[in-house]
Image (cartoon, rainbow, N blue to C red):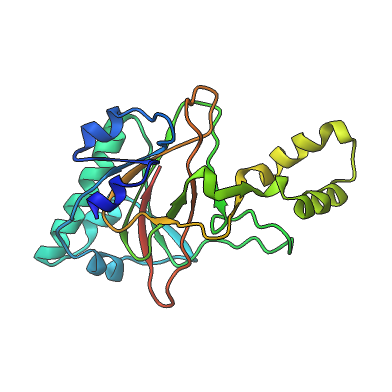
Amino acid sequence: MTNALADHAQISVVSNFSELINANFQGDQNAICWHRSLLGDFKEIVAKLELKENMTEVSVEDLLMLQLSEKANLARNVILSDIQQLTDFGASPSLNLLKNYERDDELDFISTDVYSYHIDRSPIETDTFLCTYHGPASEILPHDQVEQKILIPEIREKLKKLYDGPEAEFEAFLEEYFFDLHYQPKPNSKPVNLGSGHLWRLAVDHPTQQVLPCVHRAPMENDGEYRLLLIC
């Protein structure tokens, strides 16, 4: 899989955490992957964690309280190490047990939930880190394979009718309700699945960012299967 990922212009593949945090985004490249094959039984951890509602944040204490087999203990140590390294770096990692995210079905012509291709935005210099330990993984697309939804004429017209305010403030309205963050894949687009166990760093839209932010989306979950995801 390493070679396949390296073939994508938007992806840089590295071999350790230090390279992951020190590599620079450049050109079309806005996703960096610490590619790894993890040992351990992550499925057992998922089975022993308690899901509250559709998403539960799992603390380090929650992990440490689990009675696990030797293989699942290896998996726990990987997660704890990832959390520690990201915390030492200055990030605020969150380990989530997911049945599903909230859906945005209020408008039938545009979706703004995480299942829609979108970018992340921040007022400060930061990146998005994520790793799927169990369950389906997120997908990314390069900018030449997507179109910003607010630029699609029929969607834009419907948003203007929804807004019904001063023309000069329309763009601010689009930002306020996050419509401008979402993208439509073009015909014949080829998403890259982020896979299981790899720790990713994705470019975010902020004032000092030198590259285009990474367009990504959450996967549709499999019935009866929870995701275990580290994100910050």
Q: Residue at x 42, y 35 (%)?
A: 127
Q: Residue at x 54, y 59 (%)?
A: 115
Residue extending farthest top = 208
Picture coordinates of residue 172 (x, y %)? 75, 34
- Name the residue nearer the viewer: 156 or 20: 156
Image quarter (top left, top right, bottom left or bottom right) of the C terminus: top left
Q: How many marks?
A: 0
Picture coordinates of residue 15 (x, y %)? 19, 40
Q: Residue at x 25, y 64 (%)?
A: 45
Picture coordinates of residue 82 (x, y %)? 25, 44
Picture coordinates of residue 108 (x, y %)? 73, 64
Q: State the image quarter where residue 68 is shown.
A: bottom left
Residue extending farthest left = 70
In the picture, measured across the screen, residue 127 lies left or right of residue 179, that is left
Q: Residue at x 23, y 63 (%)?
A: 42
Image quarter (top left, top right, bottom left or bottom right) of the N terminus: bottom left
- Name the residue nearer the viewer: 57 or 75: 75
- Name the residue nearer the viewer: 65 or 225: 225
**Up-down relation of residue 91 to residue 77 (above or below):** above
In the picture, measured across the screen, residue 103 lies left or right of residue 39, that is right
Q: State the image quarter where residue 122 is shown.
A: top right
**Up-down relation of residue 27 to residue 230 (above or below):** above
